[in-house]
């Protein structure tokens, strides 16, 4: 009966999920969806919205970009942790299997979304017709990870297309990931490369361009978050923090994240926003939180209370890609049907739930089966969940 009744380890369970990270992803995707609903339905016009302090309102309904930044850091942390678990060291990560696994996870839902968006564009559906570029040009940009650049050059695409800018940032970074991993054979090179991304990020957001879209959505503007996530995972793998150090990382990281999310005016007054360092602070905060959560245990009551967040977190990728298919046709009905402002909270809740259900259905019936099928079809030693021992430490 050893370990009977003990809570599950949420560090990096072999073959399992990290519940704490699913909670973070769940919170982040909810903030993204709420932000996009707020752009279409004014929550502040409701009685509840009028009572919310500015800080609470900004946190709940104006945190979409920050939430995507959180995803960047989590992505880098998980990709690096998974590579270390699978291959034992970053310096031996093989490019072919790595790219195949990325496609197996990312490709099915992206291909389905692009097919649906193409049909909606050709059918002239309101809110889905691209007016700035030909359809083929948008499809090419989405498939070749430069939709962010296309929007910077030609203007915003419809909302269901626009969300793909972050995928362009992530997948451009991961195209380079096996090459970056070669530097892990000499730790100093890997650390310098990741820190270089971290240093360039703020400059990309405020100094390298006057184009507002490119300042927010350029590859370097998001790569610093991914790189800090990679560096956090690599560091925690080499020198796992003890209980006291883990708690310190968690508390410090949470404090930094809350400072950026909640106290935006103060961060701006300190001049950090003008320097692009507000985002860097958030990235460092999330990276510290992930290190602190590594190996921590979570009791069963906590797991039950966070079940809805973990559900959103498990399906966050599919919810992110598909939620605009729900919001674009349904959110305008609020104004079109003459709904009273005080009904806005119910609409927010309903649209949030529908967005979650749409993502969960796509995940269960499409993304996950194809992910498993692709991996099974091309399975080999590189895909084994059991790490191979490296010839030398990473």
Image: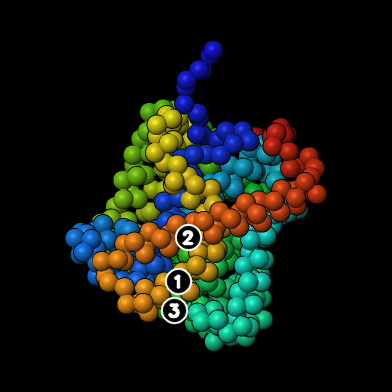
**Pointers 1 and 2 in contact (CB under 8 A)?**
yes
From the image, tell me which residue sits under label 1.
330
| Distance Cα–Cα, label 1 vs label 3 | 32 Å
Label 3's element? loop
Where is 224 relative to 119, above or below?
above
Label 2's element? helix
| Distance Cα–Cα, label 3 vs label 2 | 35 Å
Where is 270 relative to 134, above or below?
above
**Pointers 3 and 2 in contact (CB under 8 A)?**
no
Residue 228 horizontal side relative to residue 135, left or right: left
Q: How is the image coloured?
A: rainbow
Image-quadrant location for residue 134:
bottom right
From the image, tell me which residue sits under label 2.
354
**Residue at image coords 34%, 71%:** 41
Q: Is residue 98 visible?
A: no
Local crowd at mark 1 within 10 Å, few (<14), some, or many (≥20)?
some
Q: Horizontal and vertical percent for residue 352?
A: 43, 59
Where is 367 relative to 168, above or below?
above
């Amino acid at each position: 009966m050893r370990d009977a009744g003990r809570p599950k380890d949420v560090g990096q369970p072999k073959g399992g999920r990290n519940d704490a990270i699913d909670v973070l992803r769940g919170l982040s995707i909810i903030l993204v969806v709420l932000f996009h609903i707020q752009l279409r339905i004014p929550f502040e016009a409701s009685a509840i919205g009028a009572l919310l302090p500015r800080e609470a309102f900004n946190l709940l309904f104006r945190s979409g970009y920050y939430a995507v930044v959180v995803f960047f850091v989590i992505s880098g942390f998980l990709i690096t942790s998974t590579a270390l678990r699978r291959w034992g060291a970053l310096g031996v990560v093989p490019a072919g299997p790595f790219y195949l696994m990325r496609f197996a996870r990312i490709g099915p839902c992206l291909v389905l979304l692009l097919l649906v968006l193409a049909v909606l564009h050709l059918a002239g559906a309101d809110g889905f017709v691209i007016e700035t570029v030909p359809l083929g040009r948008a499809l090419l940009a989405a498939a070749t990870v430069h939709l962010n650049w296309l929007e910077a050059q030609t203007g915003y695409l419809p909302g269901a297309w626009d969300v793909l800018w972050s995928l362009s940032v992530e997948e451009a970074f991961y195209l380079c990931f096996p090459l970056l991993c070669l530097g892990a054979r000499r730790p100093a090179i890997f650390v310098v490369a990741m820190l270089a991304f971290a240093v360039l990020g703020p400059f990309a957001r405020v100094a390298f361009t006057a184009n507002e879209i490119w300042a927010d959505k350029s590859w370097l503007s998001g790569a610093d978050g991914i790189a800090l996530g990679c560096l956090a995972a690599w560091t925690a793998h080499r020198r796992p923090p003890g209980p006291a150090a883990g708690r310190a990382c968690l508390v410090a990281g949470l404090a930094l994240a809350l400072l950026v999310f909640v106290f935006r005016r103060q961060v701006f007054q300190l001049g950090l926003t003008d320097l692009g360092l507000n985002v860097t602070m958030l990235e460092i905060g999330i990276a510290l939180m992930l290190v602190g959560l590594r190996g921590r245990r979570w009791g069963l009551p906590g797991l039950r209370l966070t079940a809805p967040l973990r559900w959103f977190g498990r399906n966050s990728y599919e919810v992110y890609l598909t939620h605009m298919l729900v919001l674009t046709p349904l959110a305008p009905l609020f104004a079109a049907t003459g709904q009273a402002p005080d009904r806005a909270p119910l609409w927010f809740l309903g649209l949030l739930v529908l967005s979650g259900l749409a993502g969960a259905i796509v995940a269960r019936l499409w993304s996950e089966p194809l992910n498993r099928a692709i991996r099974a079809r091309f399975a080999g030693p590189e895909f084994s969940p059991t790490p191979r021992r490296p010839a030398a430490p990473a």
